[in-house]
Amino acid sequence: MIKKSMWYSIITIAFLGFIVLSIGFYQAIYATTKVTPQPSVITEIPETTGDLTKLPTKNSNSFQVLLLGDSVAKGTGDEKAKGFTGYLPEVFKNITSKEIVINNAAVDGLESLALLEQLQSRRLDKIIADSDFILVSIGGNDVRGILSLNSLAKDDEFKVRQDGYLSSLKQALLHLRTTSPNSTVIFVGLYNPYAKATSAEDTRLLNTWNYNTQQLVEEDGNSIFIPTYDLLKYNLGRYIAQDGLHPNSAGYQALSNRISKSVETILSTT
């Protein structure tokens, strides 16, 4: 009888041990296979160059505006720190009810060759493809050094610089059009912040630069050249920043108003 009870005890203990082992095994499997919820991630678009190849798909209820080029596109000189990034949405909203999204990839001091290299890196291709408007300001840093040369060297250096600039700009515009066939390219022409101290020769060279740029830009049927020379020439005291070079807040607002008039039809019918 004792032996029989002992065997019952052994079987019972073994059975309970099997149950405990099974529960432990199940918990181990559950712990290693369950999915842990991940927090939501909000992608922020940087204002300078970066990897913009994985941005969300374009929202059809918004206008995407990309700013490319030099310090003018970046908004340098604006004492209110707004520039085109701040003023374009304000003036565009007077024309359309769509949300205006501004992405700024401009860089202080950028020249035309550096802009081309920025585009050829393809890091901006995704955002270029999704943009409705691409505003470009480039050339001021290419031409500025020429104006300080003496008259004998100026014409030769101007031709060399202009040829290189036009070549880089042509390739840059081709890249934009290939990447974004339907976007409107808005090119901001050059102004002369030193108009009161500029010779007639320098004025001629700058006008030639703007003219040749406009001819190149407008070869593309969906690109707009925005002249700025006249707007700032007669308003230097009102529109130029304290650094004597860039537009101030009022200058950027005036330029934004001129741009909005040029794209008013596009904004109101899209």
Image (tube, rainbow, N blue to C red):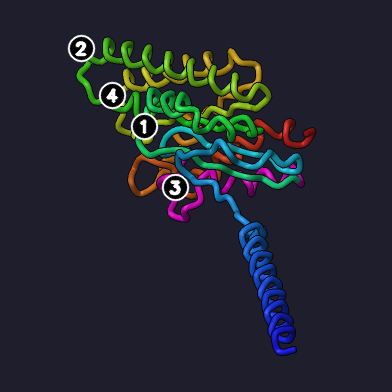
Q: Amino acid at mark 1?
A: Ala
| SS at badge 3 | loop
Label 4 vs label 1, nearer the camera: 4
Q: Which residue is mark 2?
A: 152
**Percent coordinates x, y for residue 32 in the rendering:** 61, 59
Gap between marks 4 and 2, in whole Å?
Answer: 12 Å
Camera-nearest residue between 195 and 172: 172
Camera-near label (1 vs 2) is 2
Q: Which residue is mark 3?
A: 248
* Mark sitting on residue 105: none
| Neighbours of disc 2 within 10 Å: few (<14), some (14-19), many (20+) | few
Q: What is the span of residues highlighted in magenta in the rendered image? A: 73-97
Callout 4–callout 2 Cβ contact below 8 Å: no
User: In whole angstroms, how far apart are the C-alphas of marks 2 and 3?
Assistant: 35 Å
Q: What residue do we see at 28% from left, 24% from top?
A: 147
Q: CA distance from mark 4 to mark 1?
A: 12 Å
Residue that mark 4 sits on: 147
Mark with earlier residue (1, 2) = 2
Is residue 46 left or right of 89 when viewed as pictured? left
On residue 195, the disc is 1
